[in-house]
């Protein structure tokens, strides 16, 4: 959802790593995607706080926003 809206890019929070491991007598290589959950969670928390603050302070901010655009 965050990536679909374009507010946060996947390349900013995820990276591909090559994992090499032994399985029996052979070595297997796999590409694994690791994502930084701290960055994603912080983004979501900030978004929630902004929505909450607009709800609480929205009526007080509305005249200022209207004056700024006119």
Image: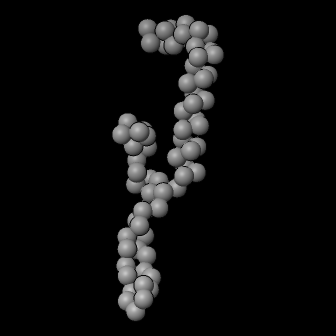
Q: Which residue lies furthest to the bottom in this view?
A: 25
Say how the picture is coloured. one colour
| Residue at 54% over, 33% down | 47
The answer to which quarter of the image holds residue 69 is top left
Residue 48 is left or right of residue 15, and the answer is right
The answer to which quarter of the image holds residue 2 is top left
Horizontal and vertical percent position of residue 37: 54, 52
Question: Quick one: quadrant of the C terminus?
Answer: top left
Horizontal and vertical percent position of residue 12: 44, 53
| Residue at 57% over, 19% down | 54
Q: Taking the image as drawn, is residue 22 in sight?
A: yes
Task: Say above or below: 38 vs 57.
Answer: below
Quick one: 17 or 22, which is closer to the camera? 22
How many discs appear? 0
| Residue at 54% over, 38% down | 44
| Residue at 60% over, 23% down | 52
The answer to which quarter of the image holds residue 45 is top right
Quick one: 21 or 51, which is closer to the camera? 21
Question: Quick one: quadrant of the N terminus?
Answer: top left
Horizontal and vertical percent position of residue 48: 57, 30
Q: Taking the image as drawn, is residue 61 in sight?
A: no
Horizontal and vertical percent position of residue 49: 61, 29
Q: Residue furthest front?
A: 24
Task: Say above or below: 31 vs 35.
Answer: below
């Amino acid at each position: 959802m965050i990536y679909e809206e374009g507010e946060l890019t996947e390349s900013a929070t995820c990276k591909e790593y090559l994992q090499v491991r032994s399985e029996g007598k052979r070595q297997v290589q796999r590409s694994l995607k690791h994502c930084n959950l701290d960055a994603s969670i912080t983004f979501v928390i900030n978004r929630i706080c902004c929505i909450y603050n607009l709800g609480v302070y929205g009526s007080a901010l509305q005249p200022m926003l209207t004056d700024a655009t006119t």
